[in-house]
Amino acid sequence: MSQTPPENPNQETTSKTLNPNQESSKPVQDNADPDKDLEEEEEGECPFCAYMKGGECRETFINWEKCVEEAGDEDIVEKCTQVTMALTKCMEANQDYYAPILQAEKMVEQQALNQLEQEKAENAKEEETS
């Protein structure tokens, strides 16, 4: 008895060879609803990561994620400077989508600066009283 070969006999093998961690071997271009497949692929992923991958900076974010994971105990800021800069540049170029993240980042930065100024003022007062 002979079996009928699949339309693309290399599809499953190629998919597993290229990306063994991929859950689905179905190519994205064959899907009628790529957003649905994106959601399925990212099930269990943090909402921030899923959001970042939903925009134009998907690949840049994935590169940043890989760098952070590979850094391990190393200094992430030093090791991942280039990919972080690329991600920031991409997000700024696509502000329509990434505006909420960019705004939140600016707020956190401002809060950190305010806290630093407050600590400096407190330290100056302590030095005056000593």
Image (tube, rainbow, N blue to C red):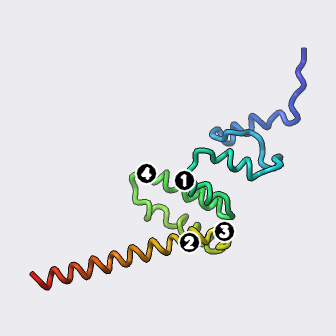
Q: CA gap, disc 4 to disc 3?
A: 30 Å
Is 72 rendered above or below residue 94?
A: above
Tag 3's secondary structure?
helix
Q: Nearer the viewer, mark 4 or mark 2?
A: 2
Label 3 crowd (10 A; few <14 / some 14-19 / many >=20): some
Q: CA gap, disc 2 to disc 1?
A: 21 Å
Q: Which residue is mark 3?
A: 97
> First in sequence: mark 2 or mark 1?
1
Three-letter residue code for mark 3: Tyr
Q: Nearer the viewer, mark 1 or mark 3?
A: 3
Q: Which mark is residue 66?
A: 1
Q: Nearer the viewer, mark 4 or mark 3?
A: 3
The percent position of residue 55, horizontal first and vertical second, equals 67, 62
Q: CA gap, disc 3 to disc 2?
A: 10 Å
Three-letter residue code for mark 4: Gly
Three-letter residue code for mark 1: Lys
Q: Which residue is mark 2?
A: 102
Q: Which mark is residue 72?
A: 4
Q: CA gap, disc 1 to disc 3?
A: 22 Å
Q: CA gap, disc 4 to disc 1?
A: 10 Å
Q: Quadrant of the N terminus?
A: top right
Task: Identify the residue at horizontal 81%, vertical 47% (top origin).
Answer: 31
Q: Which mark is residue 113?
A: none
